[in-house]
Image: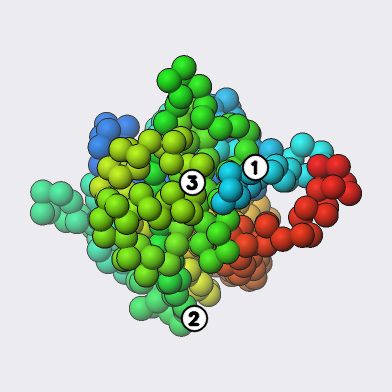
Amino acid sequence: MASTEPFSVVIVGGGLVGSLAAVFCAKRGWKVDLYELRKDPREDASQSGRSINLALSVRGISALRAAGVEEKILNNMIPMKGRMIHTRDGKLSSQPYGIFGECINSVDRMLMNKHLLDSVETLPNVKLHFEHDLKQCDFDARKAVFARKDGSSITVHADLIIGADGAHSRTRQQLMRRTRVNFSQSYIDHGYVELTIPPTQDGDYAMDAHHLHIWPRQTFMMIALPNLDKSFTVTLFMPWSKFEAIKTEEDLVTFFEETFPDSVPLMGQKLLVQEYFKNSKGSLIQIKARPYHFRDRVVVIGDAAHAMVPFYGQGMNCGMEDCIVLESILTKHCGLPSSGRRPSADTLAAALEEYTNTRNPDVEAMCDLAMYNYIEMRSSVTKAGYIFRKTVEGW
Ligand code: FAD
């Protein structure tokens, strides 16, 4: 006899992708429980995490629109219509992204995460559980075990588990124990550190706010994206050997004055030194995996399925796109969200199989493009082709 219980889904990870996936699942009428390792970011001002701001593109915006949660984000983003190249001698040149005003948009990661969690919380069939760490899954028994902060643990039932728990995903590890997953992980030999260009004394942006600023230096680069408070978040990407060579304040200031001279007065030497030595240095990982699912029991999305280096600005955008691709395949196999139908094991398994088959080649292509785009951003943008196109096409 068919179950009359609502279909239950456990989402692991309440980051940008997990919280968006929760909205889509809840709109299907499913009972959604979202478990997040960290504290609720809306109550914990100390959390900032990786990359303060991100470039949101059409991919991500389409997914936010499809979930009906785009408005606040569209009202709080800064369009960047092109790259602004900073040469070593301080010259600037603008390279528009398109001739029809195409742009990418700078958004605050935390603002977006908090807004998505707020949106999820308004849906009656979703429960959020913070400070819950996924430890183990038994996909055959449809169970997941989470450790709580107080040392206790709980075992929960899930008709379907969605792993959106990031590049070091435990859901993916558990999937790999249960089925044959082809998997590769690679770190590139470059790391990053985030710095700040504060607003000017008049409270304005220190550079043009409608560009993504790049200081391309052939084998490495620095970039800056605008924030709503008129500051810029600057990210310096370079080989670990260069980070290791900077040991003292003097080393740092000499390096910046020789390499990115126009940025030093904008940042201020004191803030530069303070932030460079205080802020953690991040590593850059690429993950590829296939399949993303096991039968009708589990599927991984976002960085848990395909972490990519950030140079194409598409990691989060692709993760959000995963949600709409999965939603459209679920609709094809299991009916419209409004049907309220409980999917059968066979239809759901067929949907997840199709999801792996259609999504995997696309996101792996994005991983490769992201890797290639580091060369584009740090070096090719300075080559004659760009200047030629700029002159001929009147950019
Ligand atoms: P995450 O953001 O990693 O979220 C995973 C969540 O799962 C976290 O909240 C974590 O606490 C939780 N979690 C982990 N383990 C467990 C567990 N065991 N139990 C419960 N919860 C768990 N992308 C773009 O599109 N544009 C950009 O401009 C861009 N810039 C970037 C710049 C940098 C420097 C970096 C490093 C990345 C950038 N990205 C960008 C990529 C983007 O950050 C990621 O693709 C995006 O954060 C992935 O979202 P996610 O929700 O899949 O994973």
Residue 133 position, x and y percent, is: 25, 55
Q: Residue at x 32, y 49 (%)?
A: 276
Disc 1 residue type?
Leu
How many numbered tags mark residues here?
3
Colour scheme of the rendered structure: rainbow
Between discs 1 and 3, the one toward the N terminus: 1
According to the picture, the residue beneath numbered tag 2 turns out to be 182
- For label 3, the residue is 261
The label shown at residue 92 is 1
Residue 50 seen in the figure: no
Which quadrant of the figure has residue 368? Answer: bottom right
Question: In this orientation, which residue lies closer to the viewer: 367 or 270?
Answer: 270
Query: Quick check: can you spot residue 394?
Result: yes
The quadrant in which residue 179 appears is: bottom left
Separation (CA) of disc 1 from disc 2: 45 Å
Q: Residues within 10 Å of mark 2 (few under 14, many from 20)?
A: few
Q: Are marks 1 and 3 in contact (CB under 8 Å)?
A: no
Task: Tell me the residue at 83%/52% (across/down).
Answer: 389
Report if the beta carbon of the residue with label 3 is closer than 8 angstroms to ligand 1: no
